[in-house]
Each structure stands twice: as C-alpha cells, then as structure tokens.
Image (cartoon, grey):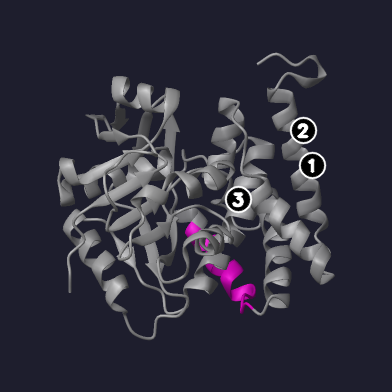
Amino acid sequence: MQQIKTVALIGLGAIGCSVARELCRAVGYDNFRVIAGGARRERLERDGVVINGEPCRFQIVPPDAQTGPADLVVVAVKFGGLESAVRDIAGQVGPETTIISFLNGISSDETLAAAYGWDHVLYGMVRRAVTMQDGVCTYDESAGTYYFGEAKNPVITPRTARVCALFERAGLRYEVPADMVREIWVKFMANVSENQSAAILGIPYAAWYEDGNDANWIREAACREVIAVANRCGIDLGEDDLIRQRARAKCTPAWGKPSTLQDIEAGRPTEVEMFSGTLCRLGRRLGVPTPVNDLFYHMIRVLEQKNAGAFGAVR
C-alpha cells in the first residue's frame, strides 16, 4: 500500500486548523500545503495562525501554483466557499489523488464527486468542538473524531486504509463507520438542531446539559424534522438517534459554541443554507413539513441582515 506523502488543505479555519498542525507534522512542512489566494494568502503568510496557543505557519500556495498533484486533498472551507474551492483545488488533483470533505451538511461530497468523480472522493465528517477567532484556534486535543470512508464500509478499501495510516501517523482520532452516509445524516441532525438554535438564542452547549428543559425541547423539535426528511430519503434515522444525540450534547464542553453562533457573533455569513435551507428545500420536494426549520431559516437570515447593517443596526 502506497503511503500518503503529500497533503493539500483548503480552508484554514476552525476545522482546517484542527487537522493542519498534525497533518503537517506527519508528512513534513515541504509536503503540506494550504491553498489560498489574494488577501487571504497574504494574511496567512504574514500572520500565520495560533493553534491551541502554538503559533503555526504553513506553506501557503495560490490555486494556480505548479506544485503537482497531492496524494490527499482535505476540503475544510465554509459552505459558501465550496464552489470556489472546487475550482481552486483543480491543480492538486491527479490520477491517484483522494479528496475528503470535512464540511458540515449532506451535500459537499456529492458536489466534489460531480466535479472530480467518486473514484477521487471519500465521504468525510467531523465531530469536534472548535472555536476560531481572529486567527486563534482553540479545541480540546483529547476529544474529537474525524470520520471518513466509502458510502458503505463492510471492509476497509485500500484508499481508505491509506488515509487511516496517515491519521495514525498524525495522532488524529478517526473512525470508518459501516454506513458513512447514515453517519453524515446523524451529524446533520445535530447541526441543524444545535447550530441553529444556539445561533438564534445565543446559547452555548451547556444549555442542553439538562434533559427536558426548554432548550432541549426546541433542539429536539428540529431533530424530528430531520428524521422525517431522512426517512423519506431512505435513510434509517429514528428516535434512538435523537436519544443518543442527547448524550453527545452533554459531552461537549459547556463553554463551547456551535459554529453558527460563532459566525453570528463575529458578523460573518452563516451556513444556514446548508442547514435549514437544504432541509426545507428537501422537505418541500418530498412533501415533508418542516415548520421549525422554516422559522429557523428566516430568523437566522434576519440576524445576518442585522449584522450587515439592516434596520439601522450597528454592530
């Protein structure tokens, strides 16, 4: 089995930073590159990032750099940057390149496969609480797991095994689920319910520590809409998954804030289109009502408009 020797990463935000340092150490500085152009490239070259208190600098290359293809491309941009990321990684993709998306949501893998083919794309997702502000990334290094693999994994395929070996060298906790697509929907249920209600209410993970409280009522109402849409799509989600998510919510640091709340507080555009936007569109197409997420969608859009200065608001 050929070892992964070169890695390209696009998206040095919260999730990107949570793997960048370890992957860079695993393959070596000269074999790890971050794809960025324009002002973002200049800023990263000038300032670097700080990961859990450690100043870190990486090799930053523009999208048109003649580096030759990477063995692995990790896509960790925000949803709004996916379309440009698909174009920007083109120079990193060769005949043997594997691409993994660590975006939230249920559609980024398909988007990448539409551009590069499933022979290049593995499914991916992350469960890790990470905060990112002004180039400073913070997370619990003892917690968090990266998931990747084929749609179904009754056995580990050679290309999945190569990524497993890299993550072992990097010291990053990973899993290869038996049913990767179902696992992505389970995570989607968590994002749709927790990210969005936290953003609207301004609450950290501690809000869900107490079973049966008002915050959990809201969160689980949104969960049940995801379950209904998933079932109509042929995905086997159910009440047991909702109950397991209660326990997961309590394992996240109380001070942690879901990424959509971080975006609202920082005045950034959110990933609402990837969360309730996607779910509600699917619901309408499949005839599944999604009233909670319809409300979530429009409330978060109003918060974005307020951050942009609408209604005479000043941040």
Q: Which of marks 3 and 1 is in front?
A: 1
Question: Is residue 258 shown in magenta?
Answer: no
Q: The residue under label 3 is which amino acid type? A: Glu
**Dot 2 and dot 1 residues touching (CB under 8 Å):** yes
**Main secondary-structure element of the magenta-colored stretch:** helix
Q: How crowded is mark 1: few (under 14 residues within 10 Å), some or many (20 or more)?
A: some
Question: Is residue 238 shown in magenta?
Answer: yes
Mark 1: secondary structure: helix
Instruction: Identify the residue position indicated by label 3 in the image.
Output: 194
Residue drawn at x 41%, y 31% is 37
Is residue 243 depicted above or below 297 in this figure? below
Instruction: Identify the residue position indicated by label 2 in the image.
Output: 302
* Nearer the observer, 99 or 129: 99
Is residue 188 depicted above or below 274 in this figure? below
Rendering quarter of residue 11: top left
* Nearer the observer, 225 or 219: 225
Rendering quarter of residue 228: bottom right
Residue drawn at x 27%, y 58% is 71
Q: Mark 2 to mark 1: distance in Å? A: 6 Å
Rendering coords of residue 129 (x, y %): 43, 46
Mark 2: secondary structure: helix
